[in-house]
Image: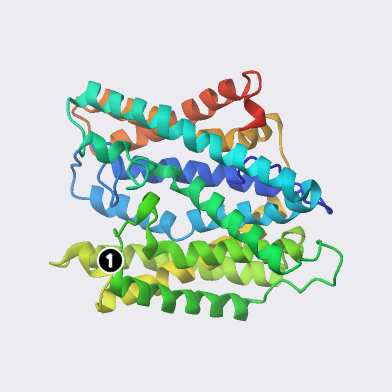
Amino acid sequence: MVVAETSVKNSGPRLIYIDNIRILLICLVIATHCSITYGGPGSWYFADPGNGTTTPFILTVIDSLNQSFFMGFFILVSAYFVVGSLVRKGKDRFTRDRLMRLGIPLLVWVLVINPIILLIILWGTGTLPMPPASLLNPFTGAGLGPMWFVFFLLVATFAYLIWTGFYRTDKPGNVKPHPFPGFASIFALGILLGIVTTVVRIFLPIGSMWLFGFQLPFFPQYITAFIIGIYAAQNNWLDDIPARAGKACAVAALFLVAVQPLFVYLILNSPPGLSQVMGGHHWQAVFFAFWEQMAGVMIITGLLWIFSRWFNTQGSVTRAMAGDSYTVYIIHPVILILLAIALAGFALPSLAKFALVLPLAICLSFLLAHLIRALPGVKRVL
């Protein structure tokens, strides 16, 4: 999601397709959290024990595919609009704006939304997944939940502000832009990210969590995505995605997506299971790190090209959904957990619950977000 920004740069066309991408991405976030709820890999506030022999396979495919690109994509797109916003507003106004639009939601989450979620879980199940002190503490990560992303953007944005204090950055359009990278450069980036990610996961396997919920095994991609987003904005890369690079990356992405289910099937049906891909010196972990990062860069580039070419228009509904996406990110855990707890007592297959809860959670989250943003003064923050 582009946090509280419209898809308009300081100059150039309105990138409507970016608004449409953020709608897709927020739906994938909800899908991932819904998948974890019903037996997919990962940690979440509430889990409804899975059943069915194919459930772990299907949900693992969904989770690992989404994880390969969606948060990095969010970060890249968010960073892309930092440059134009900074130029348009100036440092002082930009800083106040970032503190308001990122800081206030963080405080509301810690002080209001997260405690409400815990009360819902306690009311619905009678127990909490871990001690309340841990779940309420934002420094441990559990207290921030999915808002780690907003905190990361806050930290990364102010790191960029510090950078601009030492190194002057040219306004977009003031210098001759560097061309959009070709397929070979994008492929090389995937290899480099695969190497760095593999090394990081030798010491910090998947599942390792640092302060504020930062999952460092995924951070090579996240940090790179923010830097690329800034550089892309300075060179207006998203104004015109070259068809040659876009097509090549889309084809490569399709191949990598097709390979993934076979790899997941082999891993899940081996004695060690998913532990082989989490990190360490296992060849499976090395393969997965390279697949994940290569899939990430190819899917992101391919989707940018596809959406810029065929989905650069909006109607009133999609325009509203794009504007509400930041709010949806913040409130969707409440909706998802309420629905999951309500269905927990029903003897339905996990995949059936997943298929029922996911569209309901998406629709209700967007509806509630739209109502919240209609309140006086709320749009100044959200």
Q: Secondary structure at mark 1?
A: loop
Q: Which residue reaches farthest left?
A: 271
- Which quarter of the image is occupied by the C terminus? top right
Vertical position of residue 228 compared to residue 136: above or below: below
Report if residue 142 is visible in the image: yes
| Of the pair 205 and 29, the residue shown nearer to us | 205
Report if residue 7 is visible in the image: no
Q: Quadrant of residue 231?
A: bottom right
Residue 366's spot in the image, x, y percent? 53, 29
Residue 333's spot in the image, x, y percent? 40, 34
Residue shown at 46% from the left, 68% from the top: 220
Residue shown at 47% from the left, 74% from the top: 193
Going by the image, does 41 lie left or right of 170? Answer: left
Residue 222's spot in the image, x, y percent? 50, 61
Residue shown at 19% from the left, 63% from the top: 273
| Of the pair 222 and 40, the residue shown nearer to us | 222
Vertical position of residue 28 compared to residue 109: above or below: below
Q: Quadrant of residue 274?
A: bottom left
Query: For the residue marked with disc 1, what is the amino acid?
Result: Met
Going by the image, does 13 lie left or right of 344? Answer: right
Mark 1 = which residue?
278
